[in-house]
Image (spheres, coloured by chain):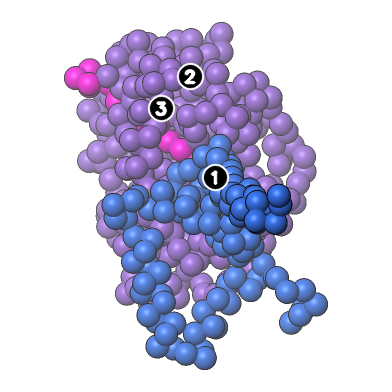
Amino acid sequence: MRVLPTLQKQHHPLASGAAQRRRLAQLPLARTFEAALDGAGLLPLLATGIEVLQVNVGKKCNQTCRHCHVDAGPDRTEMMPPDVVDACLRVLAESAIPTLDVTGGAPELHPEFRRIVAAGVALGRRVIDRCNLTITRLPNYRWIPPFLAEHRVEISASLPYFQGHQTDAQRGEGVFDESIAALRELNSLGYGRAGSGLVLNLVTNPVGAFLPPDQRAAERDWKRELGRRYGIVFDRLYTITNMPISRFLEHLDEKGQVEAYLTRLVQGFNPAAAAGVMCRTTLSVGWDGTLYDCDFNQMLDLPVGEGLPRHIRDLDAARLAGRPIVLGPHCFGCAAGAGSSCGGAVA
Amino acid sequence: MDHSHYYHAADLARFGEVGKGAPELWEKFQAWYGAVFAEGALTAREKALIALAVSHAVQCPYCIDAYTTASLEHGSNEEQMTEAVHVAAAIRGGSSLVHGVQMRNHLERLGM
């Protein structure tokens, strides 16, 4: 598979969250996200609880996707240390948060991935693995599919399109064929098959600077095409809008499309989608234990609001449950069109 | 404002300014346009592909930009969009060629 150096490895100016925020702040947008929320009667945007603890265990990945908001890649070394893993699991054990969402990078590359997943399952929580699929094909990681099946972990697997050239354009040459092989193996274990209870959802981001298609219509196409072409079955398709930060921001810059894309997101502002954004029900934990409203804010170095507990060790669920969300122009990405979240469209 | 060329990509976003001269007609156009492209007996995706093809037939650069984006956002792919453009091109080519019958009719009138 073709792998590129990350922005950090390139010492690219957009490698830092602060530089990305400055780039977005320079854009002459028709209105701010706060003004759009205000117009919809949604300001201040408040969390409504913590239904998902999304733990980003590290930035290391075997792929370097063009749209990656994490700037993940093989050259990244950030990994959640054991004491922070312990703190996350303690929070889960001491709370009633129903879902543990494990992400990265490729989360399976974390040396304690199996401990984290097994602990979440043992606590009776819904555990989601955000899997890039190709990681399961690497010789040292062939244990992943049977391990996930044994623990009945829900899989959210990335696959931008049911054809090879679009998928490889976004995720790297050779990714599509390996992803299809991985999906076939997951299907052979029961994943995605009716009645198995093993949930296999696919996640698609547009291969370019446009909004995702209607999720239900796309799911029908994908089920038909992946079934017809490759005999692959899955449960749900989640459409996710490309977030104009990190590597996708760099890609837009390279194409001279930053302003046009942001304008598209601003024009597409949908109050119903804004009301349903995932940050209202999610708490995101960075590899070092810092708390964020979402994985995007995490990559922009925007922790939860001032005065709130900002580390997983200090988590106070009651204070965080109704917190005001930290906002920026990138938030238009989750509120445009049918909206976007880690669970797909929201409106 | 640069008026050295007839077409500017940025002018697409100014389409609404056309309404200033005749607001009532503009509102009627907008309502009709919205209804035309809504999901109906044809899907919104099919309508966007038709619009993309027609955009090429009428050679409107604004429409081509708008319906390339719309087609992608309705889930069409490059192959489908290219086939739609070929349909438009084939009708344009065919419509020229079918006038060859008119030429032949006149040839017959003039000839011996």
Give the Cα distance between marks 1 and 3.
Answer: 24 Å
Question: In this image, B26 relative to A223: left or right?
Answer: right
Q: Residue furthest right?
A: B4
Separation (CA) of disc 1 from disc 2: 33 Å
Question: Which stretch did the figure color magenta?
Answer: A194-209
Q: Which residue is mark 2?
A: A180
Chain at numbered mark 3: A
Residue at 49 percent across and 56 percent down: it is B51
Q: Secondary structure at mark 3?
A: helix
Same chain shared by disc 1 and disc 2:
no
x, y percentage for residue A53? 35, 41
Give the Cα distance between marks 3 and 2. 12 Å
Chain B palette colour: blue
Residue B87 is marked as: 1
Secondary element under disc 2, as helix, strand or loop, is helix
Q: Which mark is residue A225?
A: 3
